[in-house]
Amino acid sequence: MTSFIDSLAASEKTAVVIDIGHAYTNWMYIDRYTPVRGGRWSDRLRRLSIWSIVSNYFPVKLIKTEDLDPNRNYIFGYHPHGTATVGAGINFLTEATHFSTLFPSIRPHLMGLHTNFFCPFLRELFLSLGECSVSRESCQYFLNGSSGQGNAVVIVTGGMKELYLTEYQRMIFYLKKRKGFIRLALENGVSLVPVITFGENEHYRHYKNWISNRWIWGRSIVGCLPLRHPVTTVVGKPIHVNQIIDPSQTDIDQLHDQYLQATEQLYNTNKANYGFENVKLEII
């Protein structure tokens, strides 16, 4: 293929590139609904050895506190976002930490911004690793039972607001106003599972100066590589939810309060095990 392209004149090379671009643009349009209809799961890609190499760099560990029933669907509330969301990516998009062994017959789907799937070629990787759009339509696809049971929708509930709150050696969860995932759980009668990653905020140092209000620095000359810091993701106990097709605000608030309490309890129970005994959880 390379020798063929080298043999072409400059104008012909340009034409080939344009044709490939047109073809791929057409493919993205044809395939536009895949991010909201289950993605394109590839177990082979999820098990590539490169993910274990990346995982061992930090290293990343996944901790189970309780078995999950494969005959139910789940919403994993992931905290905190961090700068690079390393724990979510390694644990739920790959098999580097042996998710399928810890939770047999449970299939995790990390939900990301829909704009991620406008990135040429990268979108194919995201979809093959199990990532899908975090839109309501996409979440409902996994939760309403039409795609079967044993689905775990992983939502980084704090989103971009929590990203900008990231600070080294602090645990800040932007959660008090996040209730959309609570409504989804009630409408579909699926279990809520709090998930906390210790070490997610420690991959970059954060600074403020006259140039930028949010300056990050990791390793290498330009500071772009993340620092080597242990990452431990703890999957908490499920909160089983009775289905309410049209939940009231009171229903949502009550379950939200229960989720906040479970999240705080999960943090306090595990913080001393992973070097965070002196770090107070801040839920805002």
Image (cartoon, rainbow, N blue to C red):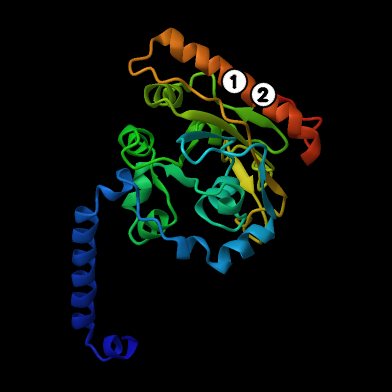
Indicate the position of residue 251 as horizontal and vertical percent values.
Answer: 45, 11
Residues under labels 1 and 2: Cα distance? 6 Å
Q: In this view, does 172 lie to the left or right of 142?
A: right
The front one of 34 and 278 is 34
Indicate the position of residue 70 as horizontal and vertical percent values.
Answer: 49, 41
Tell me the tag on residue 49. Answer: none
Q: Name the residue under label 2.
A: 264
Label 1 crowd bin: few (<14), some (14–19), many (20+), radius 10 Å: some
Query: Residue at 55% across / 49% down in the picture?
Result: 104
Query: Residue at 34% across / 19% down in the picture?
Result: 245
Amino acid type, residue under disc 2 in the picture = Glu
* Residue 99 visible from this viewpoint: yes
Amino acid type, residue under disc 1 in the picture = Leu
Q: Are marks 1 and 2 in contact (CB under 8 Å)?
A: yes
Indicate the position of residue 232 as horizontal and vertical percent values.
Answer: 69, 45
Quadrant assignment for the C terminus: top right
Q: Is residue 280 left or right of residue 90?
A: right
Quadrant assignment for the N terminus: bottom left
The front one of 212 and 165 is 165
* Residue 208 visible from this viewpoint: no
Secondary element at image label 2: helix
Query: Residue at 53% across / 63% down in the picture?
Result: 47
Q: How many marks?
A: 2
| Up/down of 274 relative to 230, above or below | above
| Up/down of 9 relative to 173, above or below | below
Q: Name the residue under label 1.
A: 260
Query: Residue at 60% across / 58% down in the picture?
Result: 96
Secondary element at image label 1: helix
